[in-house]
Image (cartoon, helix red, strand yellow):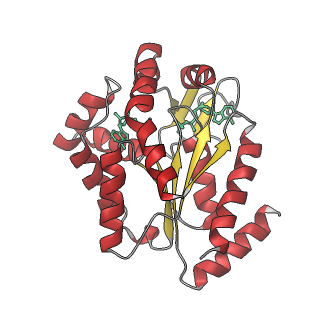
Amino acid sequence: MTLESVSDHVGVAGKRGATLNVVLMGPPGAGKGTQAGTVAELVGIAHVASGDLFREAVKLGTDFGKLAQSYMDRGELVPDDLTVGMVMARLQAADCRNGFVLDGFPRTVNQARALDDNLRRESRKIDKVIDLDVPEEALLARLSGRWLCKVCHTSYHTMFSPPTQEGVCDRCGGELYQRIDDKEETARHRLSVYFDATGPVLDYYRHAGILSEVRGDLPVAEVMDALRRRIVGAEHDL
Ligand code: ADP
Ligand code: AMP
């Protein structure tokens, strides 16, 4: 199936008023940001990345941003009540009306339960959860070589996915930067936090019967193909 025919298919469903709410799971460096933006664009739904929302708040210098930063800099999770409030507010925006791809949220079972409860109250639900599976040893190499666009958040890698011009975003021309929390020691800690706190979230969704896995250790285009197949499959059920 070509990208265009997938897009047409989903577009038709969108016009029927169908929605598609997806959670993209996976450890730091799994490729969630790399894939979620394109998937969301293709399907015509919003990409909601909790890490990007926190980084925007940090940039604004609000009290909320300062508090979030104190956790982020240490590679710790921001407390559930702050995180859930921020993400649920974002999901009220007009661009989430046809659906969303969540990236980086939920990261605890409490967050997953709160998400379900809040969506249920609005007669919405999570349709599909996809776990990007990448061997642990590949993740640190991905994080240490990661560069991100300051403007549109597109992810690059010095070796695996370099920008055409060093330091400049191919997509929007924005300046690229490296995240402080991608430094090896903090990145290692973030991975251990993921396996401890977020591992159980996978069990939560497995138990709900909506979890599937996609290999994330293949080239970006192949991972995208696999994700598209899963998402269009979910779309047929609408
Ligand atoms: P996440 O959002 O899950 O933390 P990113 O999407 O930012 O991860 O990807 C982490 C790093 O790995 C980035 O530098 C990105 O360019 C690179 N990357 C993403 N997907 C792949 C892939 N399939 N193969 C090789 N490198 C990848
Ligand atoms: P990310 O961009 O997803 O790697 O997230 C960067 C940092 O933001 C994390 O290390 C946490 O400090 C914080 N963060 C992002 N999402 C969440 C979440 N769902 N729960 C708690 N903290 C989060």
Residue in view at x 47 percent, y 63 percent? 126
Residue reaching furthest to the top: 185
Residue in view at x 63 percent, y 23 percent? 138
Residue reaching furthest to the bottom: 16
Q: Quadrant of the N terminus?
A: bottom right
Residue in view at x 59 percent, y 86 percent? 16
Q: Percent position (x, y) of residue 53?
A: 36, 47
Q: Nearer the viewer, residue 38 or 56?
A: 38
Residue reaching furthest to the front: 207
Q: Nearer the viewer, residue 105 or 163?
A: 105
Q: In the rendered image, which quarter is residue 197 located in?
A: top left
Q: Percent position (x, y) of residue 198?
A: 42, 38
Residue 150 seen from this side: yes
Q: Nearer the viewer, residue 197 or 56?
A: 197
Q: How many marks?
A: 0
Q: Quadrant of the C terminus?
A: bottom right
Residue in view at x 37 percent, y 76 percent? 123
Compared to 15, does 215 lie above or below?
Answer: above
Q: Percent position (x, y) of residue 185?
A: 42, 13
Ligand 2 positioned in quadrant: top left
Residue reaching furthest to the left: 63
Residue 175 seen from this side: no
Q: Percent position (x, y) of residue 237?
A: 63, 74
